Every structure is written in C-alpha cells, then in structure tokens.
Image (spheres, rainbow, N blue to C red):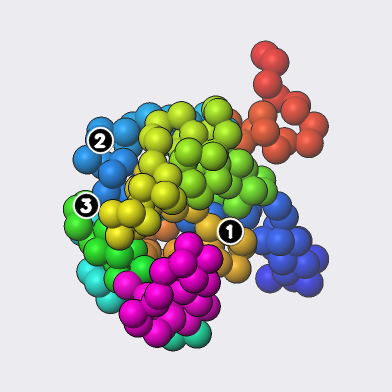
Amino acid sequence: MDKLKVILLSMEKKHHKYERTFVILKPDAVQRSLSGEILRRLERTGLKFVGMKMLVATREQAKKHYGKDDAWCTKVGGRIVENMEKEGKKAEKPPLSYGQEILNGLLDFLTCSPIVVLALEGNEAVGVVKKIVGGTEPLTSDVGTIRGDLTSDSYAVAGIDGRAVRNLVHCSDSVEEANREIGIWFESQDLVKYKHIAERMLYDVNLDGILE
C-alpha cells in the first residue's frame, strides 16, 4: 500500500462519521415491549447499527460494564450518609457499605432479565444518542427523549424501595467509554462493516450520481 493510501485510511478512521457508541436496552425495556420503539428512535437519526444481540448478562459482565471500585462506592455512600444526617437520621453503616448496596442494586437489575446490546456508528454518535436517550432520571428527563416519554421512575421512589432507577436504556458518555464498553459486550467478529444506502445522503460531499 502506498503512503497516500495509508494517510487516507488513517484520516478516514478519525472522521466523525465513523464514531461509535454503545447502548443497552435494559430489562425494563425488554419486559415492557419497548425495544422496537427505542430501536426506531435510534435508527431514524441516520446512525447505523453495526452490532446487535440479545443475551442474559452475567454478573461478571455487569461488573466490568459499570467498572466501579471501592472508591466509587465510598463516594456514593458518603452522599447517602450526608443526606441521612441532614434528615436527622443516624447512619448504621459506613459509607462503603451503602455504596456497595447501590452497586449491587445495579448489578441485580442488569442481570435479572434479557437485555439487548447495540453498537451504533455515525457522525457524533455518542452525543446524538445521549440527546435522544435523555437524562438519567426519567422524572426530570426532557419531553421527547426516550426516558422522558416512555417511563416515569424517579430517584425518590428508587431510593425508598432500595433499588436501581429503571430508566430503560444505558448509553455511553464518551467515545473512550463507548470503546471500552463495546469491548466488554462484543467480540470483533460481532461487529459488521458495511455501507448503508442512507450514508450517501448523509455524508457524500458532492451528492453526484443521485439523479438519473
């Protein structure tokens, strides 16, 4: 391969239209038969599905996915203790224990039922999906987003019940996180390289060859 082709291939890989993101349709999305609606909303953006499969997550996969350590648990548990003290309650456990309970709740939820994992590719894929999915808490997520329109859970109710917020979807916060998460849930052979017809209208610079 000549030097110019190497340079062009390198530039192509860095182009925003090749950005990838990762999405999980969580157990509540599958159990409430909302998978098709969520996929429709994602697909209509012009992003391309390059990986998709349904599975029951193992606890080990879920742990790797969340990637939370004792420091994270202590930090989260510290907030819980702080809130308890503001309400005049006395913490019965150290912050680490409360944080571990939060993490275990996340793991219990993600592994309780089948999920659908997705890898999507396209211009600014991470940002586009985050916008469509909406804020983490359904109650305060914007109207028009997946979480805002399709469910109504809240931190308050989840906290009272001692469980994870059921917000239908997980999506990556950054390109780096997306790459890490895709590596947990997909093998390289699971990801399909192909040209989508819509890409011509989305990304072709000259738009030639469309009219006959």
- Quadrant in which the C terminus appears: top right
**Element at badge 1?**
loop
Amino acid type assigned to the residue bearing label 1 in the image: Asp
Is 186 placed above or below 208 here? below
- Magenta stretch contains residue 153: no
Residue at mark 1:
173
**Element at badge 3?**
loop
Query: Decide: marks 3, 2 in contact (CB < 8 A)?
Result: no
Whole-percent x and y of residue 88?
Answer: 46, 67
Whole-percent x and y of residue 152?
Answer: 40, 36
Residue at far front of view = 88
- Magenta stretch contains residue 81: yes
Whole-percent x and y of residue 136?
Answer: 50, 49
Is most of the magenta stretch helix, strand or loop? helix
Residue at point 46% right, 74% down?
A: 81
Q: Is residue 118 left or right of residue 31?
A: right
Query: Decide: marks 1, 3 in contact (CB < 8 A)?
Result: no
Amino acid type assigned to the residue bearing label 2 in the image: Arg
Residues rendered magenta in the picture = 74-101
Whole-percent x and y of residue 57?
Answer: 25, 63
Image quarter for residue 29?
A: top left
Distance from disc 1 to disc 3, alpha carbons, whole Å, reads 23 Å
* Rendered image: mark on residue 32: 2
Distance from disc 1 to disc 2, alpha carbons, whole Å, reads 25 Å
Amino acid type assigned to the residue bearing label 3 in the image: Pro
Residue at mark 3:
114
